[in-house]
Amino acid sequence: MKINVGGFDRVLRIVVGGVLVALAWKGTIGVWGWIGVVPLATGAIGLCPLYSVLGISSCPMRKAG
């Protein structure tokens, strides 16, 4: 599978996911904060399964040659 999550998108996912997980861990927002694991993982890996299904990519186009 190809990477389909670009630079800004990856950073945003990692930051938002990390904040949600940290708040869940502290007990501030409850159990639903653990959903932050999903954007954290997709940002770290650079692959979003939903983007693949929908044919979306936030990666810049690479020039051939």
Image (cartoon, helix red, strand yellow):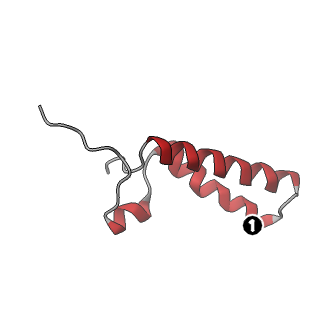
**How far across and down, in percent of the image, does residue 28 sit?**
87, 58
Query: Which residue is drawn at the image coordinates 78% and 48% (left, top)?
Result: 22
> Relative to the observer, which residue lies in front, 49 or 13?
13
Q: Residue furthest top?
A: 65
**Secondary structure at numbered mark 1:** helix
Numbered-mark total: 1
**Relative to 57, is 15 on the left or the right?**
right
Q: Tell me where residue 37 appears, x and y as whole percent.
A: 64, 54
Q: Crowding at label 1, few (<14), some or many (≥20) Cα neighbours within 10 Å?
A: few
Q: Position of residue 26 (x, y in %)?
A: 87, 51
Q: Which residue is mark 1?
A: 32
Above or below, comparing residue 64 to residue 45 in the picture: above
Q: In this orientation, which residue lies closer to the viewer: 18 or 58?
A: 58
Name the residue rendered at 66%, 56% in the picture. 36
Q: Residue at x 44, y 46 (%)?
A: 46
Q: Which residue is situated farthest in the right direction here? A: 27
The quarter of the image holding the C terminus is: top left
**Above/below status of 24 relative to 44:** below
Q: Residue at x 83, y 62 (%)?
A: 29
